[in-house]
């Protein structure tokens, strides 16, 4: 599933293709992409729209359109945005012709991705604020913020890190990599981390995300660049998907656990197991 670094990679690649361009024609062939709005309504509204800045918040791509309209695209599990893809590309859900003769395709085998049109900046911000917590790499994202959000929380810290209402944009890959770098076991109770551990985790989350952006994302699944190429961060994983291989720091065999239903990779020497509390 695309996470912050993968969506940021798409944003950077796509921006020069779409900023300042006008949508000449828009075909949406999957009602699920726009629901509850009808796809014909959204296609009509987008036809003739001029694209301003292409932004990102968490895992959402934010398309600023003229007349203070905003298209919010979420790729979910398997969505991809491709420039000049073959018209017969399988699983094409949306096709947009640009005024410079190029084409934009949204393809999505599993069909969980969405495209929502918001009709003012206030509506966009309200939509995002209801769903997303602090954005990494901003002043809002601090160790003190994380500690405050986690206060009294008994969920495992990995589940806390994955909660988009606390931290925007982190998914399964970058949560594992960040917890490993911080030396924090994913099953630690979120509310039990020390101030020093939150500082380490805050720094590790941003370091893992920055490395992911630098590698143009990870392609362990369907994630593809706008030209169909793959990212390379999967070649730099320290623990994620590396069960049975040695920890790069201490050589201990990396274990796979399940935390909150998600496959989770850990070095239990570098990330000490939580002690059982007596009751
Ligand atoms: Zn280790």
Image (cartoon, rainbow, N blue to C red):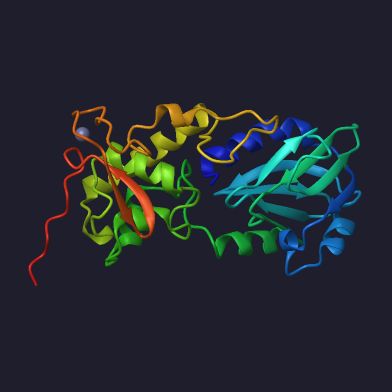
Q: Quadrant of the C terminus?
A: bottom left
Image x and y of residue 178, in percent: 35, 41
Quadrant location of residue 113? bottom right
Q: Nearer the viewer, residue 204 or 243?
A: 243
Q: Nearer the viewer, residue 191 or 174?
A: 174
Q: Nearer the viewer, residue 31 or 194?
A: 31
Q: Is residue 214 left or right of residue 82?
A: left
Q: Is residue 3 left or right of residue 247?
A: right
Quadrant location of residue 202? top left
Instruction: Mark yes or no: residue 145 visible.
Output: no
Image x and y of residue 160, in percent: 36, 58
Image x and y of residue 103, in percent: 84, 37
Image x and y of residue 188, in percent: 23, 55
Above-or-below relation of 187 to 214: below
Q: Quadrant of ligand 1?
A: top left
Residue sitting at 30 percent across and 63 percent down? 155
Q: Nearer the viewer, residue 145 or 152?
A: 152
Q: Residue furthest left?
A: 278
Question: How many badges with numbers are in the image?
Answer: 0
């Amino acid at each position: 599933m695309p996470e912050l670094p993968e969506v940021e990679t798409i944003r950077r690649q796509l921006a020069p293709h779409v900023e300042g361009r006008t949508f000449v024609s828009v075909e949406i062939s999957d009602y699920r992409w726009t629901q509850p709005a009808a796809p014909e309504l959204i296609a009509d509204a987008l036809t003739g729209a001029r694209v301003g800045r292409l932004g990102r918040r968490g895992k959402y791509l934010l398309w600023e359109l003229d007349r203070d309209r905003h298209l919010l695209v979420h790729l979910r599990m398997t969505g991809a945005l491709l420039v000049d893809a073959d018209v017969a590309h399988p699983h094409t859900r949306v096709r947009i012709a640009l005024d410079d003769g190029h084409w934009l395709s949204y393809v999505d085998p599993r069909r969980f991705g969405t495209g929502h049109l918001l009709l003012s900046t206030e509506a966009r911000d309200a939509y995002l604020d209801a769903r997303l917590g602090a954005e990494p790499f901003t002043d809002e994202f601090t160790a003190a913020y994380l500690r405050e959000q986690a206060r009294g929380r008994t969920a495992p810290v990995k589940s806390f890190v994955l909660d988009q209402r606390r931290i925007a944009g982190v998914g399964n890959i970058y949560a594992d990599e960040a917890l490993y770098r911080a030396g924090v076991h994913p099953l630690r109770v979120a509310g039990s981390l020390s101030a020093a551990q939150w500082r380490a985790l805050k720094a590790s989350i941003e370091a893992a995300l920055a490395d992911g952006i630098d590698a143009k994302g990870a392609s362990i699944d369907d994630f593809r660049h706008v030209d169909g190429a793959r990212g390379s961060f999967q070649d730099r994983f320290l623990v994620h998907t590396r069960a049975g291989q040695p920890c790069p720091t201490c050589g201990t065999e990396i274990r796979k656990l399940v935390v909150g239903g998600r496959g989770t990779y850990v070095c239990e020497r570098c990330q000490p197991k939580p002690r059982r509390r007596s009751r």
